[in-house]
Amino acid sequence: MESNYSILVKYLCQPLSTDERDELLKWRDLSSENQKLFSEASKLRLLNEYKYQNTVAETALALSRIQKKLHRNKATLKLRNIIKYTAAAVLIVGLSLFGWNRLSAEKFTTIVVAQGETVKKVLLDDGTFVWLNESSELQIPKSFSENRRTVSLKGKAFFDVKKNPESPFLVSSPFLDIKVTGTSFDIFVDEDKRQVETILVSGKIILQDTDGKDVYEMSPGEKVSYDSNNDQYTIKTVDANTLTSWYLDQITFENATLREIVNKLSLIYDVNINLESKKLAERRYRYVINREETLKEVLDILSYLAPIKYRIEGNEVFIGE
């Protein structure tokens, strides 16, 4: 079991795991003195004054005062114990980087779009619209502060941010932050690969590192890919409207082979598409599909773009020149 001071500091400075809470309660029940100290610490934890002054020094001083109050006639607070719990506080506060503003899960709402679900449109309190793609999570505060609007993203989303120069909008990720005043842009946070991809459609955004330092100011039509594994940025000029059309419930193919296009169509419409020409299969096209279109409508449009002919036989589609 950890020292009583170490587990008390954890209790005061951050949420405990189930095992840690059990450990704390076991220590509390060891003696009446422990119960009194726990009771006083619980009261201290609820004080708003403490919440905004939870430095290591304040934590150590507060525990010291409580201990002295409970043991006026006993000199039981030894120097080595003070060192133990102060060191524990240094470790906890230094590693967690939480503070009370980020402790309470109930201060945030997390919106999740599971894999296979359709795009979810979210209207934030400030008037900002967010389209959240499948396999993505958006964490938003229950209320924005007056001078900053911060959300956290995992996965892919399109933002149309309500302009407010007095309150910049910040999209936070573990690898890169995006500072916005009022604009529309696409962002994909890939936590597995530790990469972030951003496409700016309109307005202005500033990429910041995790220390809040400005790195790059994007212009409309730019795509910036950031790889945190080697701290490398790649900047390209792209057709931003085409690449971000997914949030309009569209599927975009940019410089895709006909083979790639028909493979995707097979999955969408649950059919087997046969390409009868290998040469035709390797030709590349730029193509946008609206999900509400029927397979025949999609193939009709594709036949105008490419020199193809098609026929549908039940669940089989044959495409040739």
Image: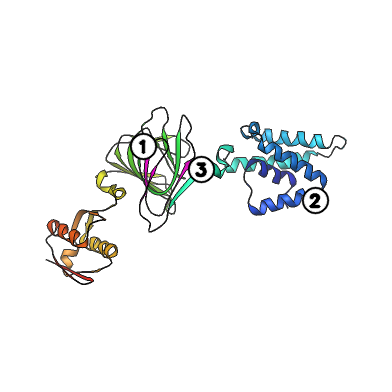
Q: Is residue 309 left or right of residue 108?
A: left
Q: Is residue 238 visible in this depiction of the protein?
A: no
Q: Residue at x 76, y 50 (%)?
A: 27
User: Tag 2 or tag 3, which sits nearer the N-term?
Assistant: 2
Dot 1: few (<14), some (14–19), or many (≥20) neighbours within 10 Å? Answer: many
Q: Which residues are magenta?
A: 115-144
**In this rendering, which labeled residue sits more in front, label 3 or label 2?**
3
Identify the residue under disc 3.
108
The CA span between labels 1 and 2 is 55 Å
- Horizontal and vertical percent for residue 117? 38, 56
Q: Residue at x 49, y 39 (%)?
A: 142
Q: Which mark is residue 30?
A: 2
Identify the residue under disc 1.
161
Dot 1: what SS?
loop
Quadrant in which residue 82 is drawn: top right
Q: Is residue 146 left or right of residue 55?
A: left
Magenta-drawn stretch contains 29? no
- The C terminus is located in which quarter? bottom left
The CA span between labels 1 and 3 is 19 Å
